[in-house]
Amino acid sequence: MRDDPTVVKRILRAELRERRQNMPAHEREQASEGFTSRLQELVGSTGAQSLSCYLSMPTEPDTRPFVRWAESNGIRVLFPVTREDGLLDWTVGEEEDEVRGLHGMPEPVGELLGPMAINDVDLILVPAAAVDATGMRLGWGRGYFDKTLGSMGKCPPVYAIVFDTEFVEEVPREVHDQPVNGVVTPTRIVAF
């Protein structure tokens, strides 16, 4: 039973969730500055003029300072909006309001652009519980990003955003899991 990837993932997610919840505020603030700087570097190195990024929960790597920077620099940012059917809609969040989505995730309010809108971005930034040295991403278990990335014909670079301790040697893998092209932590950018 312990070798079942589903069980191993569940255990690992619980450990990572607890670690994030117990992170001291000063470490979180320091990490936030690092994430913003690394993400700015990534945009500069890729030349991205449009990207997708999620709005972070309080225990996740803080994406908001980076999003504000991107928007103030004329970069188009698409945000995911969860749907009942397991797919993602996208919005640019022109109303600058947030609501809680289907699973309690923060989502911007704006015109829904449909699942295909993601095909027009230059860079995709995704949440993760952990990423391993081969680029395998462990998500939080709902499969939204795996479905989205798995359905894209021509996918731009995809980078997962995790704390330094969540860039690990190996994560469990199942057939539907989608790898990423790189990882962004507060201290580095690693491309695979």
Image (cartoon, rainbow, N blue to C red):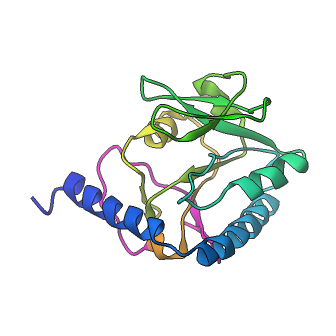
Q: Which quarter of the figure is the N terminus placed in?
A: bottom left
Q: Which quarter of the figure is the C terminus placed in?
A: bottom right
Residue 88: percent from the left, percent from the top?
A: 53, 30
Q: Is residue 82 above or below residue 137?
A: above
Residue 112: percent from the left, percent from the top?
A: 66, 22
The answer, for residue 89, to whether it is visible in the render is: yes
Residue 8: percent from the left, percent from the top?
A: 23, 60
| Magenta stretch: dominant secondary structure | loop
Of the pair 87 and 10, the residue shown nearer to us: 10
Q: Which residue is found at the position 76% from the left and 58% from the top? A: 65
* 58 sits to left or right of 119: left
Of the pair 9 and 21, the residue shown nearer to us: 21
Residue 136: percent from the left, percent from the top?
A: 42, 60
* 44 sits to left or right of 136: right
Q: Is residue 68 above or below residue 118?
A: below
Q: Is residue 77 above or below residue 189?
A: above
Of the pair 99 and 56, the residue shown nearer to us: 99
Please, which residue is most extreme toward the left here? 1
Please, which residue is most extreme toward the right here? 73
Q: Which residue is found at the position 48% from the left and 72% from the top? A: 167
Q: Is residue 186 magenta?
A: yes
| Residue range highlighted in magenta | 168-192
- On the image, which quarter does residue 162 sit in? bottom right
Q: Which residue is found at the position 73% from the left and 71% from the top? A: 33
Q: Is residue 184 above or below residue 9?
A: below
Of the pair 27 and 184, the residue shown nearer to us: 27
Q: Is residue 24 magenta?
A: no
* 53 sits to left or right of 82: right
The answer, for residue 133, to whether it is visible in the render is: no
* 113 sits to left or right of 103: right
